[in-house]
Amino acid sequence: MITLNHSLHSALKEFFEPLRPNDSRTDFYTVYSRKSGEFDQNYAREYDDLNTFLIFVSCLIFALCIEH
């Protein structure tokens, strides 16, 4: 019978290259931490791009309003 730990460990081996054999909890939290950190970095990068774009647009709108 396959246990939940065995299933989790097998899935991690297949998709995320676990760090330690037969330690599914450590593997899960290591992979989770790595993936959540990557997501946070991508989100921050996209937010910075959006922030720069909004500043540029607001300066352009302000310049256009001053001319009229």
Image (spheres, helix red, strand yellow):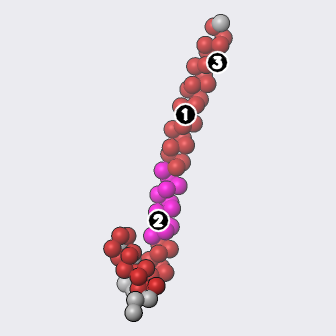
The quadrant of the image that shows the N terminus is bottom left
Q: Are marks 2 and 1 in contact (CB under 8 Å)?
A: no
For label 3, the residue is 62
Lateral position of residue 7 relative to residue 51, left or right: left
Amino acid type of disc 3?
A: Phe
- Residue 19 position within the rendered picture, expressed as x and y whole percent measured from the top left: 39, 77
Residue at horizontal 54%, vertical 41%?
48
Magenta-span inclusion, residue 48: no
Among the two numbered marks 1 and 3 on one chain, the one whose residue lies closer to the N terminus = 1
Magenta-span inclusion, residue 40: yes
For label 1, the residue is 52
Amino acid type of disc 2?
A: Arg
- Residue 20 position within the rendered picture, expressed as x and y whole percent measured from the top left: 39, 81
For label 2, the residue is 34
Residue at horizontal 38%, vertical 76%?
11
C-alpha gap between disc 2 and disc 3 = 42 Å
